[in-house]
Image: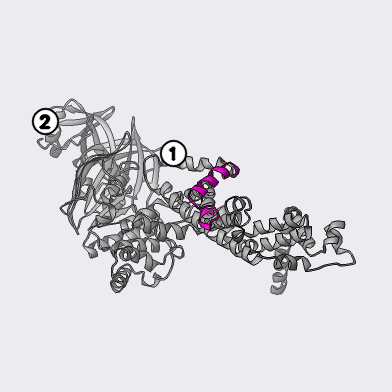
Amino acid sequence: MAEVRFENVTKRFGDTIAVSNLNLEIPDKEFLVLVGPSGCGKSTVLRLLSGLEELTEGNIYIGEQLVNNIPPKDRNVAMVFQSYALYPHMTVYNNMAFGLSLRKVAKAEIDRLVKEAAHILNIEDLLKRKPRQLSGGQRQRVALGRAIVRNPAAFLLDEPLSNLDAKLRVQMRAELSKLHERLGATFVYVTHDQIEAMTMASRIAVLDKGVLQQVGTPGELYDRPANVFVAGFIGSPAMNFFEVTLGGNDDKLYLESGSLRLLVPASKTAMLIPYQGRGITLGIRPEDIHDKEYVPAGIDASAPLRAKVDVIEMMGNELFIYLVSGKHRFLARVDPRAKARPGQDIEVVLNLSNLHAFDTKSEEAISGKPD
Amino acid sequence: MSEVEGTVISRLGQFGAGLRKFAARLPLHVIIIVIALLWMTPAFGLLVSSFRPATAIATSGWWTAFETPFKFTLDNYGTVLSQNGMARSFLNSLIISIPGTVIPVLVAGFAAFAFAWMKFRGRDVIFMFVVALLVVPVQMTLIPVLRLLTDTHLVATFPGIWLAHTAYALPFAVFLLRNFFAQLPKELLESAYLDGASNMRVFFRLILPLSVPALASLAIFQFLWVWNDLLVALVYLQDPSKSPMTVTINNLVSSFGTQWQLLTAAAFISMMLPLVIFIALQRYFVEGITAGAVKG
């Protein structure tokens, strides 16, 4: 078990920069999820850590050891691949024992370790089968078992749930979290699915185009995204963005855009004063937009907005309404009893105490904290 | 409608459907059977001739053997088999063919692995060069190689001919195996590297077991080629005590003139072993030709 550190790590493939100046610390026992859209470099980061790719610049430390020039097999990390990569001609037992037998571990010890891992993963009665006789979920467990017996410093998981059906994925998410608890090991997990990130991670690192956007706990990323990208990526359905201008005077600020005119709540005024008279990007999460008839208690309903309903999606416990107002298109998650129908006009209320504001040019969050 | 009637009607329906399917594919079956018969005819004729006495072969076509009077004989086989040195020749053929198959497959295997999965400068250029050697006709190499073998004192020795056969086999073998190895899932090999396997281990414990169809079909191809080879053996293996069956049979013909009856019998004797091997291993052969990516 060990901590992992990336120091100014850059990886170039020819002219393309896959990973750009990454600085990241992963403490021991953490479940860190690397998340981002396709092509953002998250898998490359994992492969750099495993040693399957060589970095162009920078340093990587596992424990306190610099591992730049250490081959994959000596880095003491175990990887679980998206396609599981089980050896098709070997039984489950031999798949799990392969790495150990290569390291010349005693047979009795191998037997003990394999059986223990099989017990943890509940695959004891599958030990004599070959991979082609297993279901997807079972294969994935064998892939995990293969990693567990190695007792590595860190587990590297590359989108392990992508090949499973939706229901199994939900089940395995919980199992992976429990496994992490039980093993007390460092997990570095790569996924493009932000739901997996939010549910399993102790911390999330968001990447876009090779650049680290933000690192933090799921709560931090959700409540205080550092920029527009993170704000729009974390949370499903995604945050709504509006281009608005800050009008009004020193006492009362208004968010204005076309016919839109919303009063900025007191809690946010100080933060936005420096931007008075300028344009900003306003971010509101769909769950902070309520149907006027069904506003939850404690929310200030004095600033309604009139909009036309485009599409509705009934989710059972809530209603998604796609709304249009002038040139703004946005999504609201409202009480399922709301009577919105496509083509109708309804009134919604925005909970501006949860607003997010971003500098239009730099796309960074306006936080009001001194630099 | 009673249950029994219902079952009978549905069974008839199934039968009808099966019959219709068969009828629809009947032209296809007919064409295939005709082609197969056409292909087999010369070989069949040869087989029949091998059982006929010399005079009969010389005077009439083999199809007449099925009219009375039936004149079949085993004399031809007897003569050929009792020739001096036929057993020795069979052994020589084995001694030439087996290493002549195993060595190229192993060497090509190592080379193909390097070309497919190891990174080194000039890899692709060297690979293209090796494959381009396919273009060179065997005949062009006879004199230079003979000179080389003579200079290294390998002429008329078994190791010499093994080397020669290996060299001739490599371009195709490397090409075939490299393409097959390249299709193996990269993650499988990466997983093995992470587990601590060296390249050798990966080759023997991962690549070879997963490539059995390609290796088997290559081995069969190569074995047949070497077993039936006359030219290479004649040129490089000049020692009569080391002649394979092809050379011995060839001598039979030239020393006794055109003795068709002996020739046909000898041909079939020589064909026996490859035929048995092919039929026994034909499953791998078919798999090898149609092998696609391995499912990891």
Q: Residues within 10 Å of mark 1 (few under 14, many from 20)?
A: few
For the record, the magenta segment spans B139-160
Instruction: Residue A12: name its quadrant.
Output: top left
The residue under label 1 is which amino acid type? Val
Residue A371: assigned label: none
Is residue B289 left or right of A290 when viewed as pictured? Answer: right
Q: Which residue is mark 2?
A: A251
Instruction: Residue A166: name its quadrant.
Output: bottom left
Residue B125: assigned label: 1
| Label 1 secondary element | helix
Q: How many marks?
A: 2
Residue A292, visible in the rendered structure: no
Q: Residue at x 63, y 53 (%)?
A: B230
Residue A158 locus on image (x, y percent): 32, 52
> Which of the image's four quarters has the N terminus of chain B?
bottom right
Determine the chain carrying the residue at label 1.
B
**Dominant secondary structure of the magenta stretch?**
helix
